[in-house]
């Protein structure tokens, strides 16, 4: 049996799935599974998507894709028998989640509509059935594998079944904590920034184009090149002070000056659609002078000296002095946003931090090192390396959680394949001769 996970249901909408395909494809039915059909256009749409993402689509890839669709249709058939459903509200939320991702890629809702030559409502309507079927399939699959567990004995058996040459290499991993001390912005610097944005607002009120001034003067590099336009965003996607003002503006109105953690803003409402607004803005950041940077260094040095006293713990000092809101209440312990754990692969660590911890041993604390975040804030950080592993072949002793996760996936796949074998026998399945030569992982022609 080929070593692949054909039951992953990775057929999620991609941006190319929304695109209008050039030319006309003569459609035909390639398979029937119960009451569900697979069309040639279903395959071709996914092939276009895969190629757009750099995937080589050969005959084997087409067969794999076809079998995934057979599996999805079997799940849909069984879901109908078992009354497994999703609500329209759940479908709408999932469509919105995917659309928001695509909008973020192209820059705005309007640009997405222009690119695909369809309105947002048309895009939603066109793919509502596809998304709903995917969600029902995933829910049905969850019922098949949701109760599957692995015992320690099964984990050990799974590990021992792997050929020594096939045991995966675990990359270096680290856990670390930090105390971040940011340089403060002086009142003089705040005043200078306020006066600058006040002058820009006055120029707009006197008739100059908001978008032109945003391109020339906004310090939000991401939106400045687009005339300050942010695209459609909900309240939760904006900082509170900004969203309160944005959602009160009338079309084309220009706001008063708004202060947030990023600096001073003025904004102009382009359009509001339900619970989302599209605004353009100009950001002016107060500058941090070298005097304040030196003060931050002096404080960081003092904190570092105190850490040399046995009775003072790193966790206590992080809670008292750190300006990193995301870690200070957790003793400075950094959390990997990709896994929601404290463990990072080396390539997931901020390069500024990596250059410090690569020379450290577990338990060591670094002297203060310069720090600068993506918003340009300067300061100093003290880093404590908690754990660090070297690249190694996975073992049960050091990597049990990873082996356990792999064993669980393996057992879930076997459970799913047994389910397919059982259900396919009792389900009407007809496959077009075009795909009968495929080497499937399951017998679909019983």
Image (cartoon, rainbow, N blue to C red):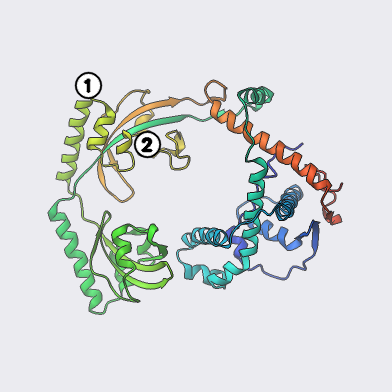
Residue pictured at 84% horizontal, 57% vertical: 432
| As drawn, 225 above or below 373 | below
Quarter-of-image position of residue 275: bottom left
Q: Position of 417 compared to 239: left or right?
A: right
Residue pictured at 58% horizontal, 72% vertical: 122
Mark 2, residue position: 334
Which is more toward the observer, 65 or 240? 240
Mark 1, residue position: 311
Q: Position of 249 compared to 128: left or right?
A: left
Residue 54 drawn at (x, y percent): 62, 52
| As drawn, 348 above or below 198 | above
Q: CA distance from mark 2 to mark 1?
A: 23 Å
Quarter-of-image position of residue 443: top right
Residue 150 drawn at (x, y percent): 63, 30
Residue pictured at 36% horizontal, 25% vertical: 360
Q: Position of 177 compared to 312: left or right?
A: right
| As drawn, 68 above or below 361 | below
């Amino acid at each position: 049996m080929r070593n692949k996970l054909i039951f992953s249901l990775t057929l999620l909408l991609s941006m190319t799935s929304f695109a209008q395909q050039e030319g006309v494809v003569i459609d035909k039915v390639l398979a029937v599974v119960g009451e569900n059909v697979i069309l040639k256009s279903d395959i071709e749409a996914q092939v276009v998507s895969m190629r757009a993402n750099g995937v080589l689509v050969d005959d084997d890839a087409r067969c794999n894709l076809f079998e995934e669709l057979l599996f999805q249709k079997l799940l849909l058939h069984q879901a109908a028998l078992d009354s497994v459903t999703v609500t329209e509200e759940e479908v709408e939320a999932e469509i919105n989640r995917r659309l928001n991702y695509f909008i973020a890629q192209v820059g705005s809702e309007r640009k997405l509509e222009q690119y695909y030559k369809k309105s947002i409502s048309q895009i939603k309507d066109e793919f509502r059935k596809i998304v709903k079927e995917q969600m029902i399939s995933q829910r049905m699959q969850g019922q098949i594998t949701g109760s599957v567990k692995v015992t320690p004995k099964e984990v050990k058996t799974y590990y021992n079944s792997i050929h020594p040459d096939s045991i995966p290499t675990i990359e270096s991993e680290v856990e670390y904590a930090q105390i971040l001390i940011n340089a403060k912005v002086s009142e003089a610097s705040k005043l200078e920034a306020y006066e600058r944005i006040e002058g820009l607002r006055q120029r707009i009120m006197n008739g100059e184009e908001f978008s032109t001034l945003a391109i020339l003067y906004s310090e939000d590099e991401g939106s400045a090149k687009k005339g300050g336009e942010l695209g459609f965003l909900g309240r939760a996607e904006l900082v509170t002070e900004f969203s309160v003002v944005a959602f009160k503006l009338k079309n084309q109105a220009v706001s008063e000056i708004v202060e947030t953690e990023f600096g001073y803003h003025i904004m102009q409402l382009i359009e509001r659609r339900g619970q989302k607004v599209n605004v353009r803005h100009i950001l002016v950041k107060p500058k941090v002078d070298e005097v304040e940077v030196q003060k931050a260094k002096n404080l960081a040095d003092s904190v570092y000296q105190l850490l040399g006293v046995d009775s003072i713990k790193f966790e206590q000092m992080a809670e008292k002095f750190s300006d990193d809101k995301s870690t200070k209440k957790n003793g400075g312990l950094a959390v990997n946003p990709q896994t929601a754990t404290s463990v990072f692969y080396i390539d997931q660590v901020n390069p500024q931090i990596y250059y410090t911890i690569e020379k450290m041993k577990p338990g060591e604390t670094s002297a203060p090192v310069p720090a600068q975040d993506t918003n340009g804030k300067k300061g100093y950080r003290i880093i404590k390396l908690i754990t660090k592993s070297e690249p190694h072949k996975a073992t049960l002793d050091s990597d049990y959680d990873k082996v356990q996760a792999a064993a669980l996936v393996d057992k879930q796949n076997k459970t799913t394949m047994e389910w397919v074998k059982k259900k396919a026998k009792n389900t009407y399945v007809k496959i077009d001769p075009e795909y009968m030569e495929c080497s499937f992982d399951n017998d679909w022609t019983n």
